[in-house]
Amino acid sequence: MSRNPNYSLLLTGLGALCLALFAASVLIGPAAIRPGDSLRALSGQGPEMLQLVMRQIRLPRALLALMVGAALGMSGAVMQGFLRNPLAEPGLVGTSASAALGAVLAIQLGLAASFPLALPLAALAGALGSVVLVLLLAGPRGGTMALILAGLAISALAGAATALVLNLSPNPYAASEIIFWMLGSLSDRSMLHVWIAAPFIICGAALLFPTGRGLDALTLGEDAAAASGIDLRQLRLMLVAGTAAMIGGATAVAGTIGFVGLVVPHVLRHAVGARPSRLIAASALGGGAMVLAADIAVRLIAPERDLKLGVLTSIVGAPFFLHLILKTRRLEW
């Protein structure tokens, strides 16, 4: 896989793009700080206030953008490979909606106000609960269709519960905070949020990377994959657990950010030769680049209005999703 020069060149280019956008994310902000002063502050030199801005505000935001984007892109790639459907996205297993429900309950019950870590921890608990419920509903030997239906049921239930909490909320300030959190953002995050999300995203990546061989075999169908020695039950478990860990960790610190897991794998699919195993790493880098670029854009487009990251990704992703639907219809005709 790594011997393919075109694939290696693609990964190198995406990696270089991520590094450039990461540097830009660290250097761009509302305060006009010269690049040289910013770099010295990151290394622990210069005024203490400048060091605080660079090391506790800008650096965590750039790291989270890279991590969240990589989690969304990689999860979307494996979901599309497993379901053999370019319209699939990570939210199909219900993790995003369940994580959002956990965070909403933490805000509504006042836990987030009394304990700062309550919101991300509640979101992670919601994501974990969705994994357990999906596996219980799909059954140990449940096929792809059972997994999809279970994920859709959990997603619908979590979405309805979130709407119910908003509908019955007696506190308009809590309701406003819930709505703004669900729009998705990386502002006002610290290194503590990085350390909360990192273990889950790293564990999720460790589970998803080895699924490449199984996903390649699945392109020929489940029967052919099973005949080639692929344990479909183990593959399904690794995929659900890995996706839940990555999406749960990302949603816990950034809120709901849509369309990255749908758009990035589809854009890169032809560049990797339509092989799911190659798409995993490429989508991780592509997702990181997309979220980094979007987070830079929200700071430049309307810095005084606090444009939300999830809103911008949806504005970009929704037309692309419609394009995919129309393209699919033309192919069917």
Image: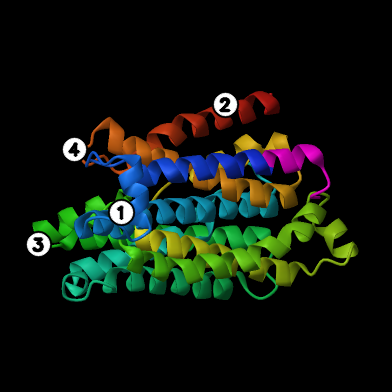
Rendered image quadrant of residue 8: top right
- Residue 170 in the magenta stretch? The answer is no
Q: Height in image: 302 above or below 138?
A: above
**Relative vertical location of residue 102 with respect to residue 327 in this rendering, above or below:** below
Residue position marked by numbered label 4 in the rendering: 305
To which residue does mark 2 refer?
326
User: Given the image, on which type of amino acid does mark 2 rest?
Assistant: Leu
Measure how far apart labels 2 and 4 are at the Cα level.
Answer: 34 Å
Q: Residue at x 29, y 56 (%)?
A: 57
Decide: is 4 above or below 57: above
Find the residue positioned furthest to the front: 46
Provide residue 323's location: percent of width, then percent of height: 54, 27
Amino acid type at mark 1: Met
Q: 98 left or right of 82?
A: left
Magenta highlight on residue 5: yes
| Label 2 vs label 4, nearer the camera | 4
Quick one: label 2 or label 1, which is nearer the N terminus? Answer: 1
> Mark 1 = which residue?
54
Q: Give the CA distance from mark 1 to mark 3.
A: 35 Å
Q: Earlier in the sequence, mark 4 or mark 3?
A: 3
Magenta stretch, residue numbers: 1-10
- Nearer to us of marks 1 and 3 is 1
Looking at the rendered structure, the kind of residue marked 3 is: Asn
Which marked residue is nearer to the observer: mark 4 or mark 3?
Answer: 4
- Is 89 on the left-hand or right-hand side of 173? right
Identified at 19% across, 37% down, the residue is 305
Element assignment for label 4 = loop
How far is the residue under mark 3 from the one under mark 2? Answer: 43 Å
Q: Is residue 310 among the parts visible in the rendering? A: no
- Magenta: predominant secondary structure element? helix
Instruction: Choose between 288 and 264: the one closer to the eye.
Output: 288
